[in-house]
Amino acid sequence: MHKNIYKTKIIDKTVLSIEGKDKVEFLQNLISNNMELVSNTKSIYSTLLNPQGKFLFDFIIFKGNEKESLYLECDKNRSEEFIKLLNMYKLRKDVKFSVIENITIYLIYGEYQFLLSSFNLKHTEGSTSNMNNNIFLIDPRNKKLGIRLYSSNDKLPSEISDIDNKSIKNYETIRINLVIPDSNKDLEVGKSFLLENNFEIMNAIDFNKGCYIGQENTARQKYRGTAKKLLTKIEIEGKTLSMGNEIKLDNRKVGVIRSIRENIGLATIRREVYEEYKSKNKYIKIAESKIKFIK
């Protein structure tokens, strides 16, 4: 039994199959990352924005076992909404989207490096392999988030079958410490900007690929430094806070509490407030609690 490595089944995501001769060109003109990077050994993380550059959907794109197959992992609860929007944009393009019903997604995280050679993976973000009808990839956002396994088999590979099953809560601690947002908890659909929520360091944006929906405003924030907020890690003292609690100074809203795991969490905060309080290592009071910016 290996220690400090865990697995869990991901139940809030689903996988779409993308077919048709125009699928790569179609996605290249829509999404924030570069489809030219996707190969049998490389997967990407990306987003779909509205024309104002505000967040709508995030997803992982990877190739399947067959030569021309292309898959996309997205939020299960919003998959129908996502497909509807993609179909609205496709016009006369030869591209088709469908939900794959028989794929199970597993997450292997912790000290997983001993598995790399067995699964033919490199220890880099997005490294991908296809073996025995299983697809393995290292999370393209950050390799510390672990390996994702997409399996159409009932039987897990022997290398991971004896790994301890753990609650997703343990994974949440890793994610929060890395200051990586969960789109269901930490973002506001149609309101959040990528560069205010760490998407650049999560490898979700290619600033050299050319035009895509929302590209102009995203590039402006990058090169003119116009992002007004940021997502940061917080330390909590006192009573437990709740996701959605407002952060106020002199009765003026300056931020919002996002994900929380015990005494740490994430918060969206105005940049000037963060810079002032972080530089002076000061706390902000919220009711019977107080928070301090860690990163």
Image (tube, rainbow, N blue to C red):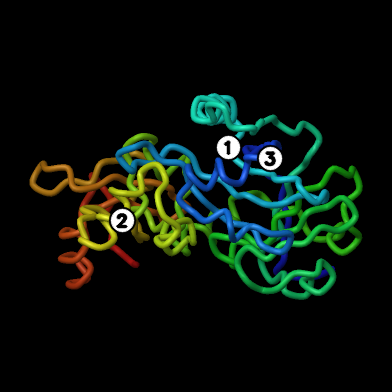
Question: Which residue type carries mark 2?
Answer: Ala
Relative height, residue 14 to residue 261 (above, below): above
Horizontally, residue 122 falls left or right of residue 290, namely right
Q: Mark 1 points at which residue?
A: 75
Q: Nearer the viewer, residue 133 or 33?
A: 33
Disc on the earlier residue, 2 or 1: 1
In x, y percent, where is residue 24? 61, 46
* Local secondary structure at mark 1: strand
Residue mark closest to the camera, 1 vs 3? 3
In this picture, is 184 found above or below 112? above
Q: In which quarter of the image is the N terminus?
A: bottom right
* Crowd class of label 2 (few under 14; some 14 to 19; many from 20; radius 10 Å): some
Check disc 3 and give the amino acid type: Lys
Residue wearing tag 2 = 219
The answer to whether one can see residue 261 in this image is: yes
Give the label, 2 or 3, closer to the camera.
3
Number of disc labels: 3
Q: Residue at x 17, y 58 (%)?
A: 273
Q: In x, y percent, where is residue 200?
A: 41, 61
Residue 175: give x, y in percent of width and height: 52, 58
Say which element carries label 2: helix
Name the residue beneath numbered marker 3: 21
Q: Residue at x 69, y 59 (%)?
A: 39
Q: Is residue 26 left or right of residue 190?
A: right
- For the residues labelled 2 and 1, the Cα–Cα distance comes to 26 Å
Residue depth check, mark 2 versus mark 1: number of the one nearer the observer: 2
Q: What element carries label 3?
A: loop
Residue 264 in view, yes or no: no
